Image: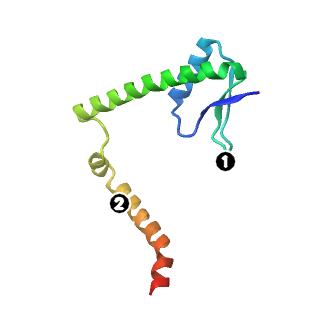
Amino acid sequence: MSKLLLNLRNVADDEIQDVTALLDKAGIAHYRTEPSPWGISFGGIWIRDDADHPRAKVLMGEYQQARGERVRGEREAALREGTAETFGSLIRRRPVFVVAVLLGMAVATALVLLPFVLLRG
């Protein structure tokens, strides 16, 4: 029976390619399911043979640790060089978008809190 190795929700395309290449290199049989058109399922990478699942999890853990270190290093380098996106740079680059999002958040918060304010008053 197949076992899920990686849920593809919010997983970058390059990470999916890296994981499938890692599994191929290790000789672990796997397959990928695609996300549903309605967003109910986000797809996944599945291991075909239960016996391979523990080995795949170890490989996945090592990969994620290495990727995390690499990505953190890239982020720190971008911050040092001033090329990383920050809230301040986002405001300067897209002020209308930031204001619209903040207004939307305020409206959503007001709508959620409205029943409590009306019941209290």
Residue 36 drawn at (x, y percent): 68, 43
- Could you tell me which residue is drawn at 42 percent across and 63 percent down? 105
Residue type at mark 2: give it. Val
Q: Judge from the rendering whether residue 96 lies leftward or rightward of residue 64; answer left or right.
A: left
Residue 73 drawn at (x, y percent): 32, 27
Task: Give neighbour class at mark 1: few <14, some 14-19, many 20+ (Cα, 10 Å).
Answer: few
- Could you tell me which residue is drawn at 67 percent across and 35 percent down? 34
Residue type at mark 1: give it. Ile
Q: Judge from the rendering whether residue 96 lies leftward or rightward of residue 3; answer left or right.
A: left
Please say which color scheme the image uses: rainbow
Residue 47 drawn at (x, y percent): 68, 24
Whether residue 106 is situated above or below residue 20 in the rendered picture: below
Q: Quickly name the residue at label 1.
A: 40
N-terminal-most mark, 1 or 2: 1
Q: Quickly name the residue at label 2.
A: 99
- Could you tell me which residue is drawn at 38 percent across and 29 percent down? 71
The C terminus: image quadrant: bottom left
What distance separates the C-alpha of mark 1 from that of mark 2? 30 Å
Whether residue 43 is situated above or below residue 60 in the rendered picture: below
